[in-house]
Image (cartoon, grey):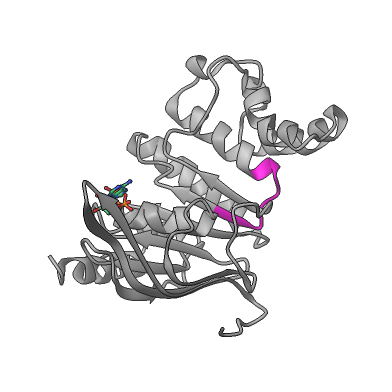
Amino acid sequence: MSSPAKDTMVQVNGLSVAYWHQGARVKALEEVTFTIPKGGTCSIIGPSGSGKSTLLYVLSGLMDNFSGEVLIEGKPVSRGRRKTALILQDYGLLPWKRVWDNAALGLTIRGVSNKEIEDILGPILQELGLWELRDRFPAQLSGGQRQRTGIARALALKPDLLLMDEPFSALDALTREALQQQVQRIWSKGNMSVALVTHSIEEAIFLGQRIIVLSPNPGRLMAIVDNPLVGQKDYRKTKEFYEMATKVRGILESDS
Ligand SMILES: Nc1ncnc2c1ncn2[C@@H]1O[C@H](COP(=O)(O)OP(=O)(O)OP(=O)(O)O)[C@@H](O)[C@H]1O
């Protein structure tokens, strides 16, 4: 087993995953290798079917049927890791619970006291602009507000590894950009490692210090692009952002 550096949060070595479907073996990922540093953000981009969601399931510990090595903080990935949080596309909100209770759900399940929940959740809801909406039900929220509630729930658990599967895909362009900006601010505080799956080249570049590019099915590693200007003011409007988008697009198109 290789020994990861102390500043590495995620280390993936030669990861391959296959599913069985109607008696046939369907390859999802083949020999994928990369790392995510502690406190670093990483976008995972690739066409439909390139194994992006599969990769997140493996990192979350939900899927253990793989070959290769997956280490989180130097230890083999496991389902019970309490400091890993996963946010899925449908936000996972319970329709009969108010914003507050939906955001508190993970803490409630862990048996955290109401007093402690208040102390943890208050600042998070404030930061995400949800405080005034805390008594609403999900049906009374916009898509962006629902997504922020899902993010609040994950942040309340104080994860050191946050995994997000296309979290903004259902949102209109402006809401999406505003929310990207908001999560970028939270992440830039640097105490969390983040892996974000996306179809969007723009989103990958706006949010990931490192961009993992996967090939069409089965997903192989096409490139790891370092994106050091992430978080820079008005990055989206710069020449460098445009050049980075052209570079990532070129890599994606080189295998289609
Ligand atoms: N439960 C399953 N059984 C059989 N095959 C599956 C299963 N889940 C995924 N696959 C296949 O594995 C491959 C990778 O799927 P995955 O959902 O990880 O890709 P993706 O890149 O996230 O796709 P998308 O961008 O469309 O969400 C695809 O070919 C898919 O059809």
| Quarter of the image that includes the N terminus | bottom right
160 inside magenta stretch:
yes
The image position of residue 80, as x and y in percent, is 65, 52
Asked if residue 2 is positioned above or below residue 139 in the image, the reply reads below
The picture quadrant where one finds residue 37 is bottom right
| Quarter of the image that includes the C terminus | bottom left
The number of numbered discs placed on residues in the rendered structure image is: 0
152 inside magenta stretch:
no
The magenta span reads 155-162
Residue lying at 34% horizontally and 39% vertically, measured from the top left: 173
The image position of residue 63, as x and y in percent, is 47, 54
Residue lying at 39% horizontally and 67% vertically, measured from the top left: 211
* One can see residue 256 in this view: yes
Asked if residue 171 is positioned above or below residue 228 in the image, the reply reads above
Residue furthest out toward the left: 256
The image position of residue 249, as x and y in percent, is 22, 65
Residue lying at 57% horizontally and 53% vertically, measured from the top left: 162
* One can see residue 234 in this view: no
In screen coordinates, is 43 left or right of 215? right
In screen coordinates, is 135 left or right of 62? right
Asked if residue 151 is positioned above or below residue 234 in the image, the reply reads above
Residue furthest out toward the bottom: 2
The picture quadrant where one finds residue 99 is top right
The image position of residue 178, as x and y in percent, is 46, 41
Residue lying at 65% horizontally and 44% vertically, measured from the top left: 155
Name the foreground residue: 85 vs 43. Answer: 85
